[in-house]
Amino acid sequence: MRCFNYISETLSQDEIIHYQNSRLRETIHWAWAQNGFFRKRYTEAGLLRLHDFCNASDLVHIPFTNKVDFRDTYPLGMCCVERRLIREMHMSSGSTGSAIVMAYTAPDIEQWGECMARCYVMAGASEGDAVQITPSFGLFNGGFGMYHGAQSAGLFVIPTGSGNTERQIKLAKDFGTKILCGVVSYAIRIHEVMNAKGIELPDLKVGIFGAESFSEGMRKRIESQLGIEAFDIYGMTETGGVGTLGMDCQEHNGIHVWEDHYYIEIIDPVTGKNLPDGEQGELVVTSLSRQAIPVIRFRTGDLTKVISREKCACGRTHTRIAKIAGRTDDMLIVKGVNFFPQQVENALMEIPGVLPQYQIVIEETDGVRDVRINVEADESVTGYMIEKHLKERLGFSPKGDVFKPGELPRQEEGKAKRVIYKVNGQ
Ligand code: DLL
């Protein structure tokens, strides 16, 4: 087994727990000492002395934080270091509210690079391999995170950034890109343009994709279309960006969370109570090694479960969580049935002839909601087939509209907008 950091990636669970306890203590103490936001929160929660916090079992007494805290403290209200120590920032605007900012000290950037480099090596990258980074190099964390990791792992970076798909493909061919990184929907776009232009990329072997709903059906589809092995990479602005929370290994049986850098809990999103392994709930993250803006019991809004804490067949020991099933605020309710967009994606990908471009249109007329699925497919697929399959798989029957390849709108940049709301026809 090749690892970027063999010792850390193969610690025993006992060693991980021991390490996490001491790092948790340090993180809580650090935040308390450095920033009034955290101090006020802890005092309000009745945690009067730092010594009350000893190890992970005391974490339940620490209040949660969430996206609202980041927004309320914009721009740097949760920052725990002097401004002169900040070296970089990233920001996500999200779909609602003001921006969420993450700041980095030099050691934070190194930590990010380490997490991301572990992901590259886990996907099979070796020194000098060409990695093409397709997310933008800007406020979105995707481009820079993939860059920092590639530098740490000793890869040859092709920093195309987003857009201009034809040029992306030309560069991938000319420079022998082995690893393609980006948001999930951009992998589909690359394949479409390759197909249309009749170009092949014989050197391309690995895809590292994330940032959006990523069903297993979609992962397999991308693998077969591009003839590569595709990995599901996870992370978010608040935890420090892409790759900080881990990726699936070559077993493709869950995301290895870098547990020496992050402590995870799964909670019931309604009661806030911790859930046992195997039960799906909301992921809560505490960072163990971040200086500028540590996250403490941060409610990610992402739904997943712990799959296993046993050593994986790949040799790594870090806990595996399931693919992100959706976000707590993503759940759609139509005619009394609850579902997540990813369930629709997975079901669509099971239908032969259906292509990976789709939209979920929620139509609300005079307060009554209906759902329509627009999907591109070849001539063998009918709307009735879509409706019937979704009925079998999801228990309700949205209207299915089949479009010819190329008819649905495409995005050259950023995360795809799969769910569209129309109220009274608007
Ligand atoms: O999307 C970081 C990233 C960039 C991950 C590139 C992977 C590749 P944010 O813009 O802050 O950061 O969005 C974070 O995106 O809370 C999830 O809801 C979603 N997300 C990220 N990765 C995945 C994934 C980046 N692999 C939010 N599967 C997270 C499903 C994902 N959802």
Image (cartoon, rainbow, N blue to C red):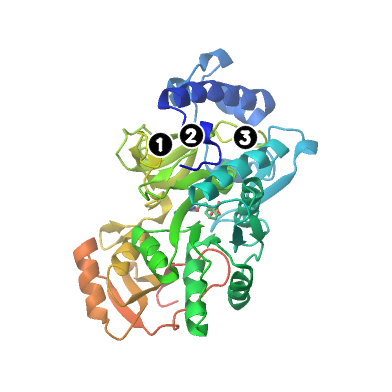
Please name the residue shown 55% across and 37% down the image: 5
Q: What residue is shown with label 3?
A: 290
Q: Quadrant of the N terminus?
A: top left
Are discs 1 and 2 less than 8 Å apart at CB? yes
Please name the residue shown 55% across and 62% down the image: 178
The residue nearer to you, when weighing 368 against 17, is 17
Identify which amino acid the numbered label 2 is placed on. Answer: Glu
Q: Nearer the viewer, mark 3 or mark 1?
A: 1
Binning the other alpha carbons within 10 Å of mark 3 as few (below 14), some (14 to 19) or many (20 upward) gives many
* Residue 391 seen in the current view: yes
Please name the residue shown 39% across and 72% down the image: 358
Helix, strand or loop at label 2? It is loop
Q: Position of residue 249 (x, y in %)?
A: 43, 47
Binning the other alpha carbons within 10 Å of mark 2 as few (below 14), some (14 to 19) or many (20 upward) gives many
Q: Position of residue 176 (x, y in %)?
A: 59, 67
Q: What residue is shown with label 1?
A: 319
Say whether disc 1 or disc 2 marks the residue closer to the N-terminus. 2
For marks 2 and 3, give the CA distance.
13 Å
Q: Say which mark, if any, is on residue 259.
A: 2
* Residue 49 seen in the current view: no
Helix, strand or loop at label 1? It is loop
Indicate whether 385 appears above or below 48: below
Q: Position of residue 66 (x, y in %)?
A: 52, 41
Identify which amino acid the numbered label 1 is placed on. Answer: Thr
Indicate whether 78 appears above or below 219: above
The residue nearer to you, when weighing 309 against 372, is 309
Identify which amino acid the numbered label 3 is placed on. Answer: Arg
- Along the horizontal axis of the image, is 216 left or right of 230? left
Query: Mark 1: is the Cβ under 8 angstroms from ligand 1?
Result: no
Say whether disc 2 or disc 3 marks the residue closer to the N-terminus. 2
